[in-house]
Amino acid sequence: PRATDCLDGVRVLSTGWVILGHTVLFGGTIFTNNLDPSFFDYLKSFGVTMIVGAFEAVDAFFVLGGFLAVHTLLPKVAAAVAPATPGSMRPIWKFMLLWGAAIVRRYLRLIPVYLTVYLVYVFVSPYLGSGPFWSQYSINEPTCKDTFYWNFLMLNNILPWGDASYNCIGSYHGIPFCLFL
């Protein structure tokens, strides 16, 4: 067994926690306004603390991702920049090449799923619903189409500077990639 095998259980628990929290909090309150008022009292009770705290469970993914990235890359970096002979210069270009390759690999791994979600959100989901509360699910389609390149570069959480109206599917989708940089 590897030293990081215990993290698989943490990932499973975090995934379940995030899904539970988003399902209860978003699924029950976004598209309806006829909920029993006792539902909101229930959300304030102590028994639902784990559900309300699910938004912080996303941080577990950031911590795990950062730890595993460092845990995976550190031995490769140490081997790449080790001097050939004692007292010689460490080749920084080997480190830069390794880091650049890791960024490209991560981008190519994330971008197919990311763009699929983006394209479905912008072009398909407006046609999937109707009804009196469907307008609450408003997609700012022109903005999403105008800022496609920020989403494609996975920089939509920081660019354009200070204007959150450009985030059509949320800013947190690009955060893991930017943290990896």
Image (cartoon, rainbow, N blue to C red):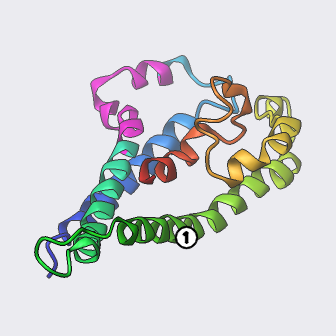
Q: Is residue 169 visible?
A: yes
The residue singled out by tag 1 in the image is 109
Bounds of the magenta span? 39-57
In the image shown, does 134 or 147 lie closer to the viewer? 147
Residue positioned 68% across, 32% down in the render? 160
Queried whether the magenta region covers residue 41, the answer comes back as yes
Q: Left or right of 97: which side holds 11?
A: left
Residue positioned 55% across, 70% down in the render? 109
SS of the residue under disc 1: helix
Queried whether the magenta region covers residue 22, the answer comes back as no
Position of residue 115 relative to residue 168, above or below, is below
Query: Hey, what amino acid is under mark 1?
Result: Arg
In the image shown, does 92 or 157 lie closer to the viewer? 92
Residue 98 in the image, given as x and y percentages of width and height: 40, 71
Residue 97 in the image, given as x and y percentages of width and height: 44, 70
Q: Is residue 128 visible?
A: no
